[in-house]
Image (cartoon, rainbow, N blue to C red):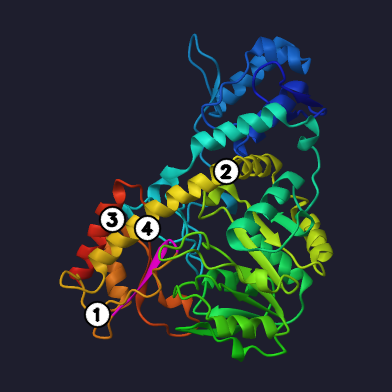
C-alpha cells in the first residue's frame, strides 16, 4: 500500500506492506525511511491523527507504531512536542556509510570538499572571486525569465540547448572572441569536461594533449578509454610540428597556454590550421588579458576544423555548470546525438538567465569589472613576488602572467624543493597546487597560484602569507 503524506507537510512515499498486519507494516516502512536517510534526524513527523487520516488507518494503529519506534530508539517524543526522528547511527555493515575517507584521486580537484577544508588563504587555481558574483544582475535576469518565459520552457529541450542562449552566444562570441559560428552549430554543455567526453564519442584515434597541460583532462580521456599523446610546449606555445596523421585530435589552449601562459605563435597557428586533424580549442580564460586586447580565438581561422569550447566557470562561477561548444558543421549531428544520450540537455533555467545577462550586456559589464579587478591583483603579485630587491625567494620565475587568473611560479634550481615549499604553505594555511603533476614525467618544481579566488579584502593577506612561505623555506 503506497501512500503520500500530502497534507502533513512531509513529502515522503511510504511502502506499507499489505501482509503481516497494518501496524507492523507501518513500523517497518518508517524504520526503513529512517535507516536509509529519507527521514533524517530531527524531522518532525505528522500527528497520529493526520497520518492515520492520510493512510486510511486507525489512530490507535499509528499511535502503537509510533510507540514501538520510540521504544526502539528510532523516534523521540516529548510532552507537548511533535514526534521527531531520533539520532540513529548508520548501519556499520553498509559500505556506503563508512566513515573512512575516500582515496585521494591522482589529480587535483581544485575545489574544496566542504566547509571543514576551507583554507585560511585560498590561492587555488580554477575559480574566480566568488564573492564578486553578479548576484543582483543574476536575480534580475531570473525574475525576468520566470515572469516572461512561456510554460513550455519547463518541458524537454533541444539537446543542443535553448535557442535563446545559442543565439546570444553566437553574437557574443563573434563580437568578443572572433568565433565564426551560428546558433545551429552551438551545443550547450555542463562544462568543459562534458564537452571533452562528447568529442571522445565522435572522434576515433589518439588525442594529443599539451605537455605541460591539465592533468585532470588527461585523466578524463584515460577514463574514457582513449590513448593520449604528448604535444610538447615551449616558449612559442604548442610544438605543432610534432603532430602526425595518426593523431585524430589535439586539445590546445592557443590564446593562453595552460599553465605556462604563452600564446600560440602566429607561425604555429598557421601550421595548426594546415594540420589534418580535429582541433579542440579550450578557451578557458580568453577574456582576461591585461597587456593588450585578448588574443582572438583560433577557431575564427578554421571554423570547419575546430571545436571551440568555453564555459562560465572562471567568468562567473564553476557551480553554474554552463559551457558551450561551437562545432564544425560535419560534427554537429553526432555531437548533438551524443549530448542527447549523455543527459538529454543541460538545465534550462540557467541557460535562459545567462542568455538574458548577455542580451542586456550585464555579462559584458561583469567581465569588464572583473578584468580590472584581476589586473590589479596580477600587478600586486608581480610587485611582491617578481624579480627585484624585495623578492622573497630569489630566482623564482613568473612566466606567462600577461593573461589569465593564475601564475606559474617556477622554483630556482638551488631550491627549495617543491614538496618542501608545499609543506610550508600548508603549515601557514595556504592552499595552492603543485606544478609538477602538469607534466607527464618529472616536471620542474613550482607552484600554480590562483590570484582570483580570494575576496578583495582577503587577497593582500593571502599574498603576504605566500611571500612569507617563500622567504621562510
Residue at 59% x, 19% y is: 67
Whether the residues at callouts 3 and 4 have beta carbons within 8 Å, the answer is: no
First-in-chain label (4 vs 2): 2
- Relative placement, left or right, of 364 versus 398 is right
Which numbered mark, 1 or 2, is in the foreground of this view? 2
Q: Decide: is 26 above or below 183.
A: above
Q: Which residue is mark 1?
A: 395
Q: Tell me the tag on residue 375.
A: 4
Which numbered mark, 3 or 4, is in the foreground of this view? 4
First-in-chain label (3 vs 1): 1
Q: Quadrant location of residue 328?
A: bottom right
- Relative placement, left or right, of 53 versus 136 is right
Q: How far apart, in angstroms, are the residues tagged by discs 3 and 4? A: 16 Å
| Residue range (magenta) | 404-411
In the image, 280 versus 194, the foreground residue is: 280
Q: How far apart, in angstroms, are the residues tagged by discs 1 and 2? A: 44 Å
Q: Which residue is mark 2?
A: 361
Whether the residues at callouts 3 and 2 have beta carbons within 8 Å, the answer is: no
In the image, 159 versus 61, the foreground residue is: 159
Residue at 70% x, 74% y is: 302
Q: Position of residue 451 (x, y in %)?
A: 37, 59
Q: Which residue is mark 3?
A: 462
Q: Quadrant location of residue 124?
A: bottom left
First-in-chain label (1 vs 2): 2
Q: How far apart, in angstroms, are the residues tagged by discs 3 and 1? A: 21 Å
Amino acid at each position: 500500500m503506497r501512500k503520500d503524506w500530502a497534507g502533513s507537510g512531509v513529502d515522503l512515499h511510504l511502502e506499507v506492506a499489505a501482509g503481516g498486519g497494518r501496524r507492523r507494516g507501518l513500523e517497518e516502512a518508517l524504520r526503513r525511511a529512517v535507516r536509509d536517510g529519507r527521514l533524517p534526524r530531527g524531522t518532525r513527523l505528522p500527528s497520529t491523527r493526520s497520518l492515520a487520516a492520510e493512510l486510511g488507518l486507525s489512530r490507535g494503529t499509528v499511535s502503537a507504531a509510533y510507540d514501538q519506534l520510540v521504544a526502539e530508539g528510532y523516534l523521540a517524543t516529548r510532552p507537548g512536542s511533535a514526534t521527531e526522528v531520533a539520532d540513529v547511527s548508520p548501519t556499520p555493515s553498509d559500505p556506503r556509510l563508512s566513515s573512512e575517507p575516500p582515496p585521494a584521486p591522482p589529480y587535483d580537484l581544485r575545489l574544496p570538499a566542504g566547509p571543514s577544508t576551507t583554507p585560511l588563504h585560498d590561492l587555488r587555481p580554477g575559480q574566480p572571486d566568488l564573492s564578486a558574483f553578479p548576484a543582483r544582475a543574476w536575480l534580475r535576469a531570473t525574475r525576468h525569465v520566470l515572469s516572461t518565459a512561456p510554460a513550455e520552457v519547463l518541458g524537454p529541450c533541444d539537446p543542443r540547448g535553448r535557442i535563446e542562449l545559442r543565439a546570444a552566444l553566437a553574437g557574443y562570441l563573434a563580437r568578443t572572441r572572433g568565433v565564426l559560428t551560428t546558433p545551429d552549430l552551438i551545443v550547450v554543455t555542463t562544462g568543459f569536461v562534458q564537452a571533452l567526453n562528447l568529442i571522445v564519442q565522435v572522434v576515433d584515434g589518439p588525442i594529443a594533449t599539451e605537455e605541460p597541460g591539465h592533468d585532470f583532462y588527461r585523466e578524463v580521456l584515460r577514463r574514457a578509454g582513449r590513448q593520449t599523446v604528448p604535444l610538447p610546449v615551449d616558449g612559442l606555445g604548442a610544438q605543432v610540428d610534432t603532430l602526425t596523421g595518426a593523431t585524430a585530435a589535439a586539445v590546445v589552449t592557443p590564446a593562453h597556454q595552460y599553465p605556462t601562459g604563452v600564446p600560440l605563435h602566429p607561425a604555429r597557428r598557421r601550421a595548426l590550421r594546415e594540420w589534418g586533424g580535429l582541433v579542440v580549442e579550450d578557451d578557458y580564460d580568453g577574456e582576461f588579458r591585461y597587456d593588450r586586447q585578448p588574443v582572438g580565438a583560433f577557431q575564427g581561422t578554421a571554423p570547419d576544423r575546430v571545436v571551440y569550447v568555453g564555459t562560465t566557470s572562471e567568468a562567473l562561477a564553476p557551480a553554474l555548470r554552463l559551457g558551450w561548444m561551437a562545432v564544425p558543421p560535419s560534427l554537429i549531428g553526432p555531437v548533438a546525438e551524443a549530448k542527447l544520450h549523455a543527459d538529454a540537455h543541460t538545465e534550462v533555467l540557467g541557460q535562459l538567465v545567462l542568455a538574458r545577462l548577455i542580451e542586456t550586456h550585464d555579462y559584458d559589464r561583469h567581465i569588464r569589472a572583473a578584468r580590472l579587478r584581476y589586473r590589479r591583483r596580477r600587478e600586486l603579485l608581480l610587485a611582491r613576488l617578481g624579480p627585484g630587491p624585495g623578492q622573497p625567494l630569489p630566482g623564482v620565475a613568473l612566466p606567462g602572467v600577461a593573461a589569465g587568473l593564475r601564475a606559474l611560479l617556477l622554483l630556482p634550481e638551488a631550491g627549495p624543493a617543491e614538496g618542501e615549499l608545499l609543506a610550508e604553505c600548508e603549515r601557514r594555511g595556504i592552499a595552492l597546487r603543485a606544478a609538477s603533476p602538469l607534466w607527464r614525467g618529472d616536471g620542474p618544481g613550482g607552484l600554480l597560484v590562483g590570484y582570483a579566488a580570494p575576496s578583495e579584502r582577503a587577497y593582500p593577506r593571502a599574498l603576504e602569507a605566500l611571500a612569507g612561505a617563500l622567504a621562510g623555506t
